Image (cartoon, rainbow, N blue to C red):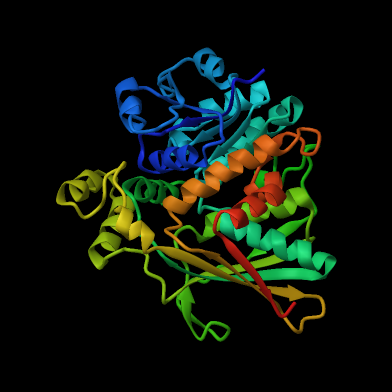
């Protein structure tokens, strides 16, 4: 019998500390925090009226047996320890083998594909729902596509999402973005993209045609220009996985862009440093020393996060072609950190509430794992969703 609903890993990091604060404010969650430094963890909860139990483990250095001894105490693992392609697998493996649910804040498609290939079958047999990409990357986009499919069913043929946001990146996010851009997709032993893997090991018939902008272009719907952004391919890959697993649309067309009116908190110098660090990794520490790139663990201020927001406007193409169905999804605070903490924590709680008999084990995107519960939880805690012209 699990002692906790959730064990939170990574609480001493920037996003993990926000998740800890969110769970403490919930007040009705039985959870523990786990990290390698007890003193730092105690400092984080010194003012909490109801203190979660502290578990001490260095996940990166520990043996797999030690990791499993901790993981078996909970119903769901919630982690922000990244980059995930370097540090994420031990927790996924333990959860998959023990039948424990898992959520993370990963924005790394390479990691997602690797975990599907290695642990989808293991998780299916144990009942573990391994759910990757549970923060800003990729909950809003993934749920928006899923919700339009729930509204339109077999009439849906494609989705275009135009996003406007205000956010400022943390050092951890910048580091992950650079890692994503450096990595090349490894060749799968499956013979096809692991995102399309079904529980029986075969390739899904519901594929997704992704069409992302290669440069700035004018969007009549929004009355302004939009273009690509670094996390666009990651969002698209979450949609690929959801479409494949839920068998939504046989040939779903997906397009997304970030609108020109967005403020991503990247100066010209920061953008240049980011680009150079991708191709010349040895320059990264220099940019840190100059303060041009934020170091891992450093993020936006509370005031900056309060000023942030994310608005997704999703346009559905249907077999009838006209009129298009339009929906608007809004997140009223910083999506990259403060609301990522909410999204990931609520994803964990949605899985805790979801009986194993109602959702089999596997490696999932958020909408494929717990769309109904997560969507309702987000609406109950600040997200808004409005359907227009459907």
Which one is nearer the viewer's eye here, 218 or 145? 145
Kindly tell me whether residue 241 is visible in this rendering: no
Rendering quarter of residue 40: top left
Quarter of the picture containing the N terminus is: top right
Q: Extreme front residue here?
A: 49
Q: Position of residue 18 (x, y in %)?
A: 41, 43
Which one is nearer the viewer's eye here, 61 or 213? 61
Give left or right: position of 228 versus 366: left
Q: Is residue 95 above or below residue 233?
A: above
Rendering quarter of residue 370: top right
Q: Position of residue 29 (x, y in %)?
A: 56, 34
Q: Residue drawn at (61%, 39%), measured in percent from left and top? A: 349
Quarter of the picture containing the C terminus is: bottom right
Kindly tell me whether residue 338 is visible in this rendering: yes
Q: Residue drawn at (53%, 18%), measured in percent from left and top? A: 70
Q: Is residue 107 above or below residue 236?
A: above
Which one is nearer the viewer's eye here, 61 or 131? 131
Give left or right: position of 83 versus 46: right
Rendering quarter of residue 385: bottom right
Give left or right: position of 302 versus 286: right
Q: Position of residue 45 (x, y in %)?
A: 36, 31
Q: Is residue 365 above or below residue 383?
A: above
* Image mark count: 0
Q: Position of residue 253 (x, y in %)?
A: 69, 67
Q: Extreme right residue here?
A: 154
Q: Residue drawn at (65%, 31%), measured in percent from left and top? A: 119
């Amino acid at each position: 019998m699990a002692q906790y609903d959730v064990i939170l890993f990574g609480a001493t990091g920037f996003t993990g500390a926000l998740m800890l604060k969110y769970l403490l404010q919930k007040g009705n969650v039985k959870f523990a925090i786990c990290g390698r430094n007890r003193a730092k963890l105690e400092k984080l909860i010194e003012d909490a009226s109801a203190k979660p139990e502290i578990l001490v483990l260095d996940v990166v250095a520990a043996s797999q047996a030690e990791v499993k001894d901790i993981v078996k105490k909970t119903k769901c693992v919630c982690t922000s320890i990244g980059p995930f392609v370097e540090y994420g697998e031990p927790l996924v493996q333990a959860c998959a083998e023990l039948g424990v649910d898992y959520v993370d804040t990963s924005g790394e498609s390479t990691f997602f594909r690797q975990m599907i290939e290695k642990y989808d079958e293991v998780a299916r047999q144990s009942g573990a729902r391994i759910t990757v990409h549970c923060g800003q990357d990729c909950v809003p986009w993934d749920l928006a596509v899923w919700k339009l499919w729930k509204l339109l069913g077999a009439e849906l043929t494609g989705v275009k999402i135009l996003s406007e946001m205000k956010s400022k990146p943390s050092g951890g996010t910048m580091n992950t973005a650079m890692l994503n851009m450096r990595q090349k997709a490894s060749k799968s032993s499956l013979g096809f993209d692991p995102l399309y893997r079904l529980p029986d090991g075969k390739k899904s018939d519901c594929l997704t045609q992704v069409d992302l902008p290669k440069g700035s272009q004018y969007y009549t719907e929004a009355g302004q220009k939009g273009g690509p952004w670094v996390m666009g391919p990651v969002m698209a890959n979450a949609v690929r996985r959801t479409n494949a697993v839920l068998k939504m649309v046989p040939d779903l067309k997906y397009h997304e862009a970030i609108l020109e009116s967005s403020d991503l908190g990247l100066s010209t110098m920061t953008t240049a440093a980011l680009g150079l660090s991708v191709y010349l990794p040895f320059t990264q520490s220099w940019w840190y020393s100059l303060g041009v790139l934020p170091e891992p663990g450093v993020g936006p201020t509370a005031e900056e996060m309060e000023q942030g927001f994310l608005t997704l406007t999703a346009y559905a193409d249907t077999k009838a072609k006209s009129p298009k169905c339009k929906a608007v999804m809004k997140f009223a605070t910083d999506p990259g950190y403060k609301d990522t903490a909410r999204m990931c924590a609520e994803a964990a709680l949605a899985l805790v509430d979801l009986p194993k008999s109602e959702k089999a084990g596997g490696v999932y995107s958020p909408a494929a794992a717990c769309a109904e519960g997560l969507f309702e939880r987000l609406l109950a805690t600040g997200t808004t969703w409005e359907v227009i012209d459907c």
